[in-house]
Image (spheres, rainbow, N blue to C red):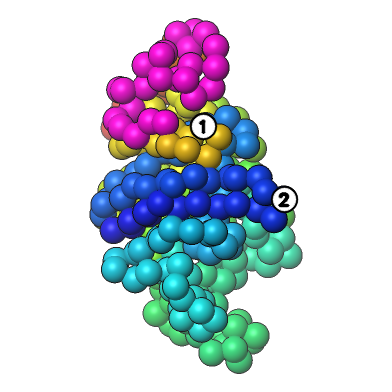
């Protein structure tokens, strides 16, 4: 379980990015983190794994206080936090398999990582993960030969190769088309539920967050202004977070896209059964 208590971040300029942010994320829960640009979403994600140093407060993962760790202890703790990035953060010249195996770099001796000679168990797990994310046929392809959706799937597999206790996901669909965005969100949520893995997904698409997240946390100017189920995101709440917008039209368009995609999946299943 992740527990964040009174997390605050003040930059040297005096700008306050986060103010007394508190919440817990139990095992298996997927949290959608929403809010306008500059609300503190990315800062919050990075404070959890100490890529950004909090100014005050605490972050505990399974009773380990991450905010108090130093050097080697912090590196070991980060191995248990999988990170999925908006821009994929893959090594383009390496193969898909090599990128996935990079998730084990914090566990293996330097000589193994330098020579890319990973233990057989790590390689077997990487193959299982590639099969789970639908990329088993692409294991030997270079990362720069993949589409955006495929690259994000590699990033998911790499994070899971770490055997994490928590997933932090930063804008996983920002560079993807709507259909691929839904596929990626569906995959992340399914994997979290299968493995009981808690996750925080920083996401700009409110409708997508409502469709897939178990819970929504809304930030405004570095403060939590909403924490509850997706159904609780009324127009009044959304206006408080983002300002005035035609939320009804946005939801209707997203629902139509989702219905069309579901129909396509059903047709594909019928064709497979016919064969």
Q: Where, quadrant-wise, is the C terminus in this rendering?
A: top left
- Whether residue 227 is in magenta: the answer is yes
Residue 29 visible at all: yes
Sequence order check, earlier mark of 2 and 1: 2
- Residue under label 1, please give it: 220
Residue 104 placement (x, y as % from top left): 50, 75
Residue 41 visible at all: no
Residues rendered magenta in the picture: 225-249
State the mark number for residue 99: none
Q: Residue at x 59, y 66 (%)?
A: 99
Q: Is residue 273 above or below residue 58?
A: above
Q: Is disc 1 surrounded by few (<14), some (14 to 19) or many (20+) residues within 10 Å? A: many
Depth check: give the residue in front, 49 or 9.
9
Q: Is residue 163 above or below residue 56?
A: below
Tag in front: 2 or 1: 2
Q: Is disc 2 surrounded by few (<14), some (14 to 19) or many (20+) residues within 10 Å? A: few
In what element is the residue under mark 1? strand
Depth check: give the residue in front, 69 or 86.
69
| Residues marked 2 and 1 touching at CB (< 8 Å) | no
User: Seen in the image, is 52 located left or right of residue 73?
Assistant: right
Q: Residue at x 26, y 52 (%)?
A: 26
Depth check: give the residue in front, 231 or 93.
231
Residue 55 placement (x, y as % from top left): 54, 59
Residue 185 placement (x, y as % from top left): 44, 39
Residue 143 placement (x, y as % from top left): 66, 58
Which quadrant would residue 90 be assigned to in this image? bottom right
In what element is the residue under mark 2? loop
- Residue under label 2, please give it: 13
Q: Residue at x 55, y 34 (%)?
A: 221
Q: Residue at x 62, y 37 (%)?
A: 38
- Whether residue 168 is in magenta: the answer is no
Q: Is residue 147 above or below residue 246?
A: below
């Amino acid at each position: 379980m992740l527990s964040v208590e009174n997390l605050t971040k003040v930059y040297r300029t005096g700008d306050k990015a986060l103010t007394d942010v508190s919440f817990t994320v139990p095992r298996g829960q997927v949290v959608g983190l929403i809010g306008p640009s500059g609300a503190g979403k990315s800062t919050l994600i990075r404070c959890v794994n100490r890529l950004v140093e909090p100014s005050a407060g605490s972050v505990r993962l399974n009773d380990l206080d991450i905010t108090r760790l130093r050097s080697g202890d912090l590196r070991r703790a980060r191995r248990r936090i999988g990170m999925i990035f908006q821009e994929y953060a893959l090594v383009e010249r390496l193969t898909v398999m090599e990128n996935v195996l990079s998730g084990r770099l914090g566990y293996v001796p330097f000589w193994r990582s330098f020579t890319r000679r990973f233990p057989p168990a790590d390689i077997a797990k990487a193959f299982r993960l590639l099969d789970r994310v639908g990329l088993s046929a692409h294991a030997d392809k270079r990362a720069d030969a993949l589409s955006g959706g495929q690259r994000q799937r590699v990033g998911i597999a790499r994070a899971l190769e770490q055997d994490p206790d928590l997933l932090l996901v930063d804008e996983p669909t920002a560079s993807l088309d709507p259909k691929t965005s839904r596929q990626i969100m569906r995959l992340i949520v399914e994997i979290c539920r299968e493995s009981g893995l808690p996750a925080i997904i920083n996401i700009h698409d409110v409708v997508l967050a409502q469709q897939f997240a178990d819970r929504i946390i809304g930030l405004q100017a570095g403060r939590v202004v909403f924490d509850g189920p997706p159904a609780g995101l009324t127009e009044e709440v959304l206006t408080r977070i983002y300002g005035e917008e035609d939320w009804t039209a946005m939801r209707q368009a997203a629902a139509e896209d989702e219905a069309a995609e579901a129909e396509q999946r059903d047709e594909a299943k019928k064709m497979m059964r016919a064969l």
